[in-house]
Image (cartoon, rainbow, N blue to C red):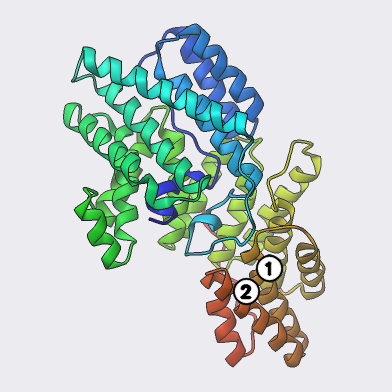
Amino acid sequence: MKAIPIALVVGVCVISGAAAPQPSESKRLLQAGLTAGYNLDYSEALDAFRAAIDADPDDPAPHRLFAATLWIRALFAQGAVTADDYLGQARSSVTRTPPPPDVDSAFREHLQRAVTLAERAIERNPRDADAHFQLGAAHSFRASYIATIEGRGLAGFGAARTAYDEHERVLAIDPGRKDAGMVVGMYRYGVSTLSWPWRLVAGLVGFGGGKDRGLRMVEDAAAFESDVQTNALFTLIVIYNREQRYEDAVRVIARLQGMYPRNRLLWLERGSTALRAGRGADARAALEEGLSALARDSRPRAFGEEARWRYAYGASLVLSGRIDDADRELRQSLALEGPGWLRGRVQKEQGKVEDVRGNRAAALQHYREALRVGRAEHDPGSSDEASRLLKTAYRRPAEVTNVRQ
């Protein structure tokens, strides 16, 4: 399975927490770790989860969240940071460096500890809903790690199926646990987006489908006060973008921006969503604010992050008719290191710049390169539009009304 069914929650640095009552100190530390992680402060998150393990050694949640933070920090370093990485079928041709052996070992050690503690709790009480939740959540991370870090999507089927089954069991024991619906709903929605042969395979191995039902379950988890709530909100960003419900996506992003103001990637996400909606002014405003934050932020950047900012900002300038400024930004993006598919999208926007300038021959060169790269990278985000633009020159569309917030 591609990104949606196996690792939908990767793109924007999301990690899911525990919903059961915790000892006060452990609960405080878990919340501090989650807040730090969502704000891209990964070292602080790891420190908080390590302290939570010391405060309550028998709780699987801090072990699982420690492992999750290692995983997400590795993805950040590889550049899988926004919904663009989980929409369509784009895949980067960049060879991703695996995490250091000690990081990989720590991930496996802490995740296995979480699984062991959850299984022991289930042995003591088979109807312990939270123990089943913890077990399912740990296996969900295992499936995602296999798919995204090891690059073996099909090898994660077993762990994904366990995660799905355990969280369905939680809902059977306690239907009020809407947080368990996040994983079940995510997988249901993901299965519905597959081609029919893959849907058949998913059904045969035990995954239920149903786009509307899956989406409702994720929305319910996003409305339910729990430590999974933020995770569900991030997941909705990807789903709403996929469904072209851009106003809903921006509404969720704006909420998260208020909750996690140090997560600069939310401004990139907001600008990119506005671009998909054809709202150049909205996109430009979000990206300019984000670029200002990026310039002030001394923390590490994701692989290809600045190239992505420059591409998105350049595309917003094309849409707004500021052609010379757009050309400057797009050239900067092309000169920076980034994922392979991004080059195709930059070339497509450069073609638009030349079309507006009346240089059709130069525009066609850019579109041909965008088509070539898009096909090589399996990215319809550049190849489909480039194919159309090879036949009909770009004309700037009328500005779309701003997104309501």
| Vertical comparison of 216 with 56: above or below | below
Instruction: Between residue 120 and residue 353, name the one nearer to us.
Output: 120
Circle 1 sits on which residue?
A: 343
Circle 1: is it few (<14), some (14-19), or many (20+) Cα within 10 Å? many
The label on residue 373 is 2
The kind of secondary structure element at disc 1 is helix
Disc 1 residue type?
Arg
Tell me where residue 298 appears, x and y as whole percent. Answer: 79, 36
| Vertical comparison of 258 with 20: above or below | below
| Vertical comparison of 158 with 171: above or below | below
Image quadrant occupied by the N terminus: bottom left
Whether tag 1 and tag 2 are in contact, CB under 8 A, the answer is yes
Disc 2 residue type?
Val
Residue at 51 percent of width and 46 percent of height: 150
Residue at 72 percent of width and 68 percent of height: 317
Upstream in sequence: badge 1 or badge 2: 1
Circle 2: is it few (<14), some (14-19), or many (20+) Cα within 10 Å? many
Distance between mark 1 and mark 2 Cα atoms: 7 Å
Instruction: Between residue 62 and residue 108, name the one nearer to us.
Output: 108
The quadrant in which residue 333 appears is: bottom right
The quadrant in which residue 177 appears is: top left
| Vertical comparison of 352 with 43: above or below | below
Q: Is residue 123 at all visible to an observer of this figure?
A: yes
Residue at 58 percent of width and 92 percent of height: 391
For this view, does 243 lie left or right of residue 347? left
